Image: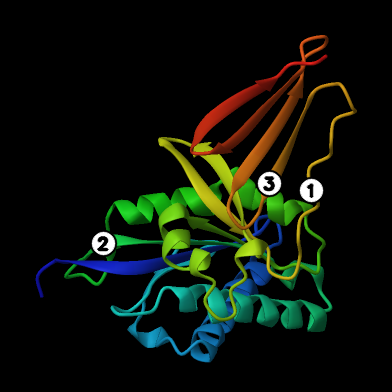
Amino acid sequence: MEAQWEYRAVLAVDIEKSSGRGNVALVRNRKTLQTLLREAFARSGIDWDACVREDLGDGLRVTAPAGTRKASLVHPLVHELADLLRDHNHRTQEPPTRIRMRTALHAGEVCLMPSGEVAGAPLETLARLLDAPPAREALAGAPQTVPVSLLMSQHFYDETVRHGYEGIDPAAFHKVGFTLKELTADAWLHTPGWTPPGEPKAPAGKGTTRKRDRSRGDSKQVSRASGNGVIYATQNGDMNIRVVKGS
């Protein structure tokens, strides 16, 4: 078989705070991760055995079979995975074998190697999404009962979430920006079963407040300049500024 370039959806998962739990817990958690992922894929109608699976040490990278509907990797897959992890953690008496994980989704042209491995720039983007600060911070800030954070690329969002397909609520996703190594990008964050609290407002007449429309990723910024009125800026790509002078 020669190397082939194909458009594929790719998913990566990484267990939160997996180091320092000891070898026994590490081995158990790796086995649990694969078991729960296999079950989540089965519930989602995606052939686990047809996926290309690559070990990431504390996690796994999965290249979906050709023709897999990308939206199915959001729902039911990620939501099923969150339910399975929640059940597992509820049953587990030993904290070292409770699992929470970061999840990332992207899609693009990848090279299927004769060795069975997968290569290509989409995998580099996937790795940055998985390790991005917004994904880490969301999971760290969520209640312990929330087992999954999902960060997907703008491309993946545009072809799945924004359409509001069955089981996917666009309002449950919000746009974030990040820079990691060579990549500066916008992405979309989702924590199934939990909505992060809104950002605090600045006191009246001071500072800046920013509001997000979670369904669109827009932001509205209001700045008050002492004695010089109010500056309103609405951002969705380009920024337009309108100054309303005070009396």
Q: Secondary structure at mark 2?
A: strand
Residue 37 point in image, percent of width and height: 54, 79
Q: Secondary structure at mark 3?
A: strand
Q: Is residue 37 left or right of residue 20?
A: left
- To which residue does mark 3 refer? 212
Q: Nearer the viewer, mark 1 or mark 2?
A: 1
User: From mark 1 to mark 2, how far is it between C-alphas?
Assistant: 37 Å
Earlier-in-chain disc, 1 versus 3 = 1
Q: Secondary structure at mark 1?
A: loop
Q: Is residue 174 above or below residue 34?
A: above
Q: Is residue 42 left or right of residue 64?
A: right
Q: Decide: few, some or many residues near mark 2? Use Cα within 10 Å; few <14, some 14-19, many ≥20.
A: many
Front position in the image: 123 or 106: 106
Q: Residue at x 55, y 41 (%)?
A: 177
Q: Quadrant of residue 188?
A: bottom right
Q: Decide: few, some or many residues near mark 1? Use Cα within 10 Å; few <14, some 14-19, many ≥20.
A: few
Kind of residue sitting beneath label 3: Arg
Front position in the image: 197 or 25: 197
Q: Is residue 242 above or below residue 135?
A: above
Contact, CB < 8 Å: mark 1 with mark 2? no
- To which residue does mark 1 refer? 198
- To which residue does mark 2 refer? 110
Q: Residue at x 26, y 67 (%)?
A: 7
User: From mark 1 to mark 3, how far is it between C-alphas?
Assistant: 8 Å
Q: Pick out the residue farthest to the left.
A: 2
Q: Nearer the viewer, mark 1 or mark 3?
A: 3
Q: Is residue 177 above or below residue 194?
A: above
Contact, CB < 8 Å: mark 1 with mark 3? yes
Quarter placement of the N terminus: bottom left
Kind of residue sitting beneath label 1: Gly
